[in-house]
Amino acid sequence: MIQGTNTGRAAMKLNERSLAFYATCDAPVDNAGFLHKRGGRGAGSHRRWFVLRGNMLFYFESEASREPLGVILLEGCTVELVDAREEFAFAVRFAGGRSRSYVLAADSQAALEGWVKALSRASFHYLRLVVRELEQQLAAMREGSPANTLSANPNPISNPRPKENGRAVWSALPEQPTAAPKRPPLPPRRRASAPNRPLASFAQLHEHYGREVRALRSQWRGGQAGLAGLEVWHRSSSGGTHTQDQP
Amino acid sequence: MRYNEKELQALSRQPAEMAAELGMRGPKKGSVAKRRLVKLVVNFLFYFRPDEAEPLGALLLERCRVAQEEPGGFSISFVEDLSRKYHFECCSQEQCQEWMEALRRARNEIRKMTGKDPLEQFGISEEARFQLNSLPRDEQTCTGSQLGVLD
């Protein structure tokens, strides 16, 4: 354990041995390949073997190394292309003033795109937040039956939290209760399959929920067309029409 | 092994799946149980001295095994050496059960089990993903309707 020089406090303990085993275990990786990594404080760039597993990006001296040189925890990171002296460069950045950025460079455009794609979705925490938000939107949308949409409320889908992504969600989850659950819902994979339906393929689920969403939307639209008498409301919330299209 | 400690510390301050004060005993022979604030955030288990803001340490939960020990107690060990156990004492078997289930869920195996990209399953296009990444984390704002897939 290394003593911190600034605070006089010991560095945080971490089960590094387990980390090293996780880095080199047989399970399939999310991405792997060579990248050039800039050393800290402009110390030049080294070609390292990188392995992405979940929210951890390990790097090794070589492909055959048995232990990683280091690991970058990716939770909370953003990934962006950068205009750097290296070709095919991108950066992994974190919020907070004192946090370091990692500038990495791939060997080709295809490799660059593969890495940026893989790293962008590596943040598990963020993934769960997105999933929960979409689940809530789906539950809210189901609650917004035709009877409810004809209210004076310009946004029948009352979801006080802003939406991260306008896309509808299809999942194998059973219907969510509208009351906030006591604890966060399980990750989708662990749940039982959708009611009255064996675990279907994504395409089937997409079709199934897509039909439901389309039906709800056209019902809502049909209801709105009948609101000729509420023209003033309609005009005054002209932006509302657009937002109500969002699931 | 080098790692970005700042980000790990920042992660320990994120909303937790589970958090409680438990008795905790390390794997070394003769170690004594101490009260620790134990906090589960994504696939990490952080532990703090009850009155401190910075974690003493973290356990990455990948490839861990969670087992019932005495009633009201469970252990965490890792595949490479299952005999090295971290012991935890709960105030009830019910709490113990809750923790064991939460820890098992925390393992990041979505992709391994389904072989699918979780975001693709939910119809989030690649373009949208890059847009999501450009949003500030602590202030999610609407990026506008993207219902192209339904039209």
Image (cartoon, coloured by chain):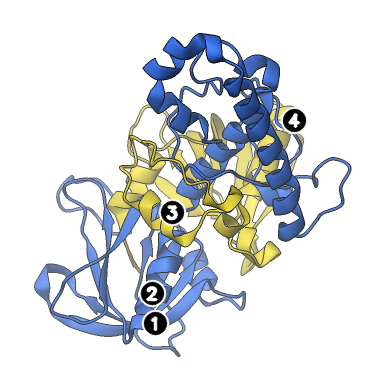
Chain colours: A blue, B yellow
User: Can you say whether B112 is above or below A110 in the image?
Assistant: above
- Are discs 1 and 3 located on one and the same chain? no
Q: Chain of mark 1?
A: A
The local crowd at label 2, few if under 14, some if 14 to 19, many if 20 or more residues have their Cα within 10 Å, is some
Q: Are marks 2 and 1 in contact (CB under 8 Å)?
A: yes
Tell me, for residue B93, which label it has, or none.
4
Labels 4 and 2 within one chain: no
Residue A110: assigned label: 1
Give the letter of the chain under mark 2: A
- Residue depicted at x 27% and y 70%: A90
Asked whether, in this view, residue A201 is left or right of residue B31, the answer is: right
The local crowd at label 1, few if under 14, some if 14 to 19, many if 20 or more residues have their Cα within 10 Å, is few
Chain assignment, label 3: B
Residues tagged 1 and 4 counted as in contact (Cβ below 8 A):
no
Q: Chain of mark 4?
A: B
**In the foreground, A106 or A198:** A198
Q: Residue drawn at (67%, 39%), measured in percent from left and top?
A: A213
Q: Where's residue A74, x and y in %?
A: 39, 58
In x, y percent, where is residue A231? Answer: 47, 13
Q: Is residue B73 visible?
A: no
Farthest residue toward the front? A228
- Marks counted in the figure total 4
Measured from the top left, where is residue A10 in percent x and y? Answer: 28, 49
Q: CA distance from mark 1 to mark 4?
A: 52 Å
Mark toward the viewer: 3 or 2: 3
| Mark drawn on residue B21 | none
Q: Could you tell me if residue A180 is visible in this image?
A: yes
Judging by the rendered image, the residue that carries numbered circle 2 is: A113
